[in-house]
Image (tube, rainbow, N blue to C red):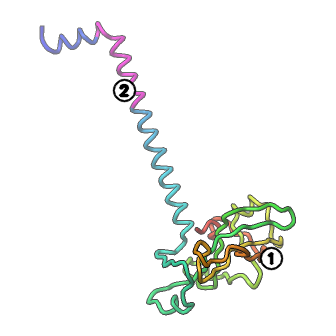
Amino acid sequence: MTLAGLIYRNLVHYWRTNLAVVAGVATAVSVLSGALSVGGSVRSSLQHLVYQRLGGATHLVSADHFFREDLAAGLQAQAAAIIYLQGVLVREHTGARALEVNVYGIDERFWTIHGKNARSAPQDRQALVGAPLAEKLGVERGDTLLLRVETQRGIPRESLYGRRENIGRTIRLECSEILPSAELGEFA
């Protein structure tokens, strides 16, 4: 008996076992290829979301204190100064609130960096609200919002001489526009 004949007789005799092995391998290959394609799709979606949130920003300089306003103008690149705080946002009409809201103080340079030249910065006591936050609180254009942010002090409140009472400030704002996600509504 030759080797080819032995293989043939083995396949014929154990056809049920061999069929189960082939079916198992086919199932494993299809599951793995499906997982890889779904993983690639998720990775691509997350990467798109990150770039959408960052806009045109490539670098960030951050500190616990404020910088000079002209620092951004003195750099040899296109730059914008942003004030970043965290706060609590309350829709005055309904009392709906969101905790740990990212609050950005921006001017016209912010829009230029992100390729949104037609926009101007919000006027005094106006706020631009991202679409996900607006949906969560039910905010519409023209609604009155209460924003509570922690005031910046020279001495940290955790230190021995730091003040622990009255550390925040509440600001009444008007929602001037709701920014969709594609218009930096999810900027982070």
**Regarding mark 1 in the picture, which secondary structure is present there?**
strand
Of the numbered discs 1 and 2, the one sitting upstream in the chain is 2
Amino acid marked by disc 2: Val
- Residue 36 horizontal/vertical position (percent): 43, 43
Q: Which mark is residue 25?
A: 2
Q: Residue furthest left?
A: 2
- Residue 56 horizontal/vertical position (percent): 52, 74
**Regarding mark 2 in the picture, which secondary structure is present there?**
helix
Task: For label 1, count other residues whose C-alpha is less than 10 Å away and answer few (under 14), some (14-19) or many (20+).
Answer: some
Q: Is residue 44 inside the magenta stretch?
A: no
Task: For label 2, count other residues whose C-alpha is less than 10 Å away and answer few (under 14), some (14-19) or many (20+).
Answer: few
Give the camera-side residue of 63 and 162. 162
Residue shown at 23% from the left, 12% from the top:
8
Q: Locate residue 66 relative to residue 60 in the image: left or right.
A: right
Give the camera-side residue of 33 and 128. 128
Q: Which residue range is magenta in the image?
A: 12-28
Q: Locate residue 93 relative to residue 81 in the image: left or right.
A: right
Label 1 – label 2 distance at C-alpha: 64 Å
> Toward which corner of the image does residue 186 lie, by quadrant?
bottom right
Q: Locate residue 171 relative to residue 160 in the image: left or right.
A: right
Residue shown at 44% from the left, 34% from the top:
31
Q: Nearer the viewer, mark 1 or mark 2?
A: 1
Residue shown at 62% from the left, 77% from the top:
162
- Residue 1 horizontal/vertical position (percent): 12, 7
Number of marks: 2
According to the picture, the residue beneath numbered tag 1 turns out to be 172
Residue shown at 36% from the left, 11% from the top:
16
- Residue 136 horizontal/vertical position (percent): 74, 58
> Taken as a whole, is the magenta stretch helix, strand or loop?
helix
Do labels 1 and 2 touch, CB within 8 Å? no
Q: Which mark is residue 122?
A: none
